[in-house]
Amino acid sequence: MPSANQRSVDRKAQGEFISTFIRQLKFKREDFRTIGSFGGFTSLVDLGNFAVSINTDGVGTKTMIAEEANRWDTVGIDCIAMNVNDAITAGSEPIAMVDYLSTKEPNQEVARQLGTGFNVGAQMSNLTIVGGETAIVPDLVKYLDVSGTVFGIVQKSQIVNGEGISDGDLIFGLQSSGLHSNGFTTVRDILKKNEIDIFDTFPGDNKKGVDVLLEPTRIYVREILDVMNIVRIKGMANITGGGIRNLSRMKDMLYVLDDPIEPQNVFSKLMEMGDLTYGQMFEIFNMGTGFTVVVDQDSRLDFINTLRNRVPFKEIGHVENGTGIQIPKYSVEFSGYY
C-alpha cells in the first residue's frame, strides 16, 4: 500500500497537473461570461437573470469493486450523486445529465443494471438523462469507467458562493451513507493487504463486505433545495476527493469542527487495517460527513427544523477568522485545500 508520503507526493503531482492544464485554457467567448473562477465544485455560465451550472465527475475505481462482485445496480446512483451533490453547492438545481460509459466489451446484463441505477438516481435527483456516449475501447480500458456531466440552473440572486461566510457562522454536517465514491484505491489496497474477501462479513459489521463497499452515495438534492427556500445558506461543500479539506474551497477561513459526526464502522476498520492516522483518514475519506452547510447563528433553528427527519445531520462546528481546518477531537489540523 502506498505510504502517506507517497500519497502526498501523488496529490501534489495531481495538483500541478491540473494547474498546468488550466493555465492553457485562455480562450473565452465574448458573448457569454462565466461566474466565479476555477476551483469551485461546479462551473457557472451567466445567462442574464439565471446562471447555468455545469460539472462532470465519475465513480472512479469503485467500479473495480463492482466488477469483482459482478454487481452494477448502484453504480449509476453513484455517478449521478457525485455530480448533483457538486451542483447544489452553488445553489443550482440539477435538471439534466449526459453520461459517458467506457468499456472493454459490451455486456447486456451490466447495461441493464447500470441503467437501473441511473434511473433511480435520476428520480432521486429529479433530473432527466437526455443522452450520453458509450465507447467500446478494449485497447484503452481494462474496467468499465462510468462518468457523467450534469447541467443545472440557478437564479443569479440565489447563487451560493461562500463569499459571505464570516467569523461565528455555524457548520452543519449531513451524514454520509458510507464511503460514497472516493478513496477506493486506498480501500482496495487495504483489503488486499489484509486478505479481506468482499463476499465475507465485513469486520465489525453484520453486512457482507460487498454490501458495505457498494453502498450508494447519498444524494442531498431535495433536502438542500428545500432548505434554500427557508434559510439563507452562506456556503456549501461536498466532501468528496480530498476529504474534509473541501471545506476550504468555500472561502479561506478557519473551520473548526469541534463536534464532528462519528465515523461509521467502515472507516474505523479501514483505519485500523491500513494503519492510517486520523489526519490521513480525513484527507482521503468523508469520515461520515458527506456534505456540509454554513449558516449564520440566526438561521440555526430554521435550518434544524427544515431538515429534521429528512436526513441524519448535526451541528459539527463553527467558522473563525483565520485559515485552514481543525478537528480538535482527533488532533487533526490542515492548512488549506491546495
Image: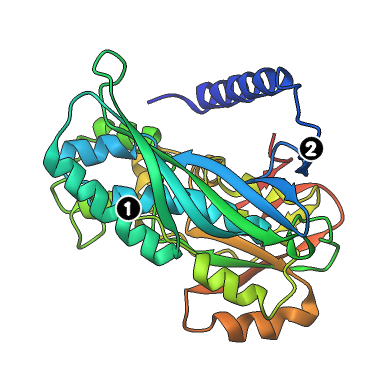
Residue type at tag 1: Phe
On-image quarter of the C terminus: top right
Q: Report, in whole angstroms, how far the alpha carbon at label 1 lies from the one at label 2.
A: 35 Å
Mark 2 residue element: loop
Q: Quadrant of the N terminus?
A: top left
User: Residue 264: which numbered mark, if any?
Assistant: none
Q: Which residue is mark 2?
A: 31
Quadrant in which residue 141 is drawn = top left
Nearest to the eye among marks 1 and 2: give it.
Answer: 2
State if disc 2 and disc 1 touch (CB < 8 Å). no
How crowded pointer 2 is (Cα within 10 Å; few <14, some 14-19, many 20+) is rated as: few
Vertical position of residue 32 compared to residue 206: above or below: above
Kindly indicate the quadrant of the structure image that contains residue 177. Answer: bottom left
Residue 11, x across and y down, in percent: 57, 26
Which sits in the foreground, 60 or 331? Answer: 60
Residue farthest to the top, as pictured:
139
Q: Do we see residue 59 in this rendering?
A: no
Say which element carries label 1.
helix
Residue, disc 1: 118
One can see residue 68 in this view: yes
Left or right for 49, reference 205: right
Q: Is residue 189 left or right of residue 111?
A: right
The residue sitting at 13% across, 49% down in the picture is 200
Q: Residue at x 78, y 53 (%)?
A: 254
Q: Name the spot of residue 189 as percent of width and height, x first.
A: 33, 31
For marks 1 and 2, the one nearer the N-term is 2
Residue 132 in percent (x, y) is at 38, 39
Residue 120 occupies which quadrant of the picture? Answer: bottom left
